[in-house]
Image (tube, grey):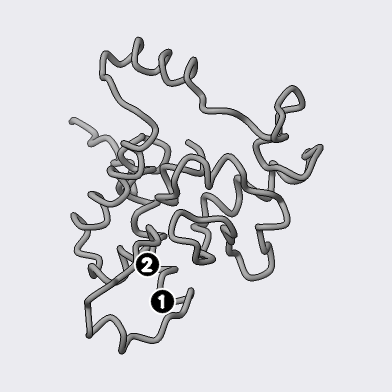
């Protein structure tokens, strides 16, 4: 599991993330250079916070996905890795499908469309009601956690329920 499927970010937004974009105190990440040119602040789910905090301990560079042999300093489009997943699963997909899946899961969990649009950083042009909503990153924390938990349960990383062992009945 990585950053993109549990955040809904675009691939380039993920690959170009710097450690300075992570606020470990507030448990947020900030994307500066977005498609719609608006800074995007997201809360980190528990899983993603732990993953990034652990990775940060051994980080050797400014980028989260650093790559020394790259002109940019960060990873390129992971074409070979995606091809391996496609070969193993038999399912053709592209990195942007992870964003679509994130959005579909959010809708399936009945997260408000306003929250979904904010999570994926879509502008809400022409929506008068959206203009009345005061934006607060904390409002997105619970939906982000719900989506992350759903993905982790589906992937078998997190238990979907507490398993209580039953004692064996003694036969007489």
Secondary-structure class at tag 1: helix
- The extreme right residue here reads 60
Q: Position of residue 68 (x, y in %)?
A: 77, 26
Q: Do the residues labelled 1 and 2 touch (CB within 8 Å)?
A: yes
Measuring from the top left, give residue 3's x and y in whole percent. 51, 44
Q: Residue placed at 39% from the left, 68% from the top?
A: 142
Residue 9 higher or lower than 80, as above or below: below
Picture mark count: 2
Residue 9 place in picture, x, y as percent: 44, 49
Residue at the far bottom: name it. 132
Position of residue 138 relative to residue 77, above or below, is below
What residue sits 58% from the left and 64% below the top?
Answer: 28
Q: Is mark 2 on a helix, strand or loop?
A: helix
Please state the horizontal and vertical placement of residue 14, each as a whole percent of the image: 54, 44
The answer to which quarter of the image holds residue 155 is: top left
In the image shown, does 7 or 150 lie closer to the viewer? 7
- Asked if residue 75 lies left or right of residue 47, the reply is right
Residue on which the image places disc 2: 118
Q: Mark 1 points at which residue?
A: 139
Crowding at dot 2, Cα within 10 Å, few <14 / some 14-19 / many 20+, comes out as some
At x 35%, y 39%, the residue is 98
Q: In which quarter of the image is the C terminus?
A: top left
Residue nearest the observer in this picture, 170 or 45: 45
Distance from disc 1 to disc 2, alpha carbons, whole Å, reads 10 Å
Q: Is residue 128 left or right of residue 73?
A: left
Foreground disc of the pair 1, 2 = 2
Q: How crowded is mark 1: few (under 14 residues within 10 Å), some or many (20 or more)?
A: few
Residue 41 appears anywhere in the view:
no
Residue 94 figure quarter: top left
């Amino acid at each position: 599991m990585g950053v993109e499927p549990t955040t809904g970010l675009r691939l380039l937004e993920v690959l170009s993330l710097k450690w300075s974009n992570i606020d470990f105190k507030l448990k947020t990440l900030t994307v500066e250079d977005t498609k719609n040119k608006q800074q995007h602040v997201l809360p980190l789910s528990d899983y993603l916070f732990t993953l990034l905090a652990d990775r940060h301990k051994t980080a050797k560079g400014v980028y989260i996905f650093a790559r020394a042999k790259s002109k940019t300093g960060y990873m390129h489009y992971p074409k070979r890795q995606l091809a391996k997943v496609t070969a193993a699963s038999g399912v053709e997909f592209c990195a942007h499908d992870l964003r679509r899946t994130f959005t579909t899961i959010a809708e399936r969990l009945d997260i408000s469309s306003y929250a979904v649009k904010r999570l994926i950083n879509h502008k809400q042009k022409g929506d008068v009601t959206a203009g009345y909503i005061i934006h607060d990153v904390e409002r997105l924390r619970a939906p982000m956690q719900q989506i992350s938990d759903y993905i982790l349960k589906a992937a078998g990383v997190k238990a979907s329920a507490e398993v209580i062992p039953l004692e064996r009945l003694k036969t007489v």
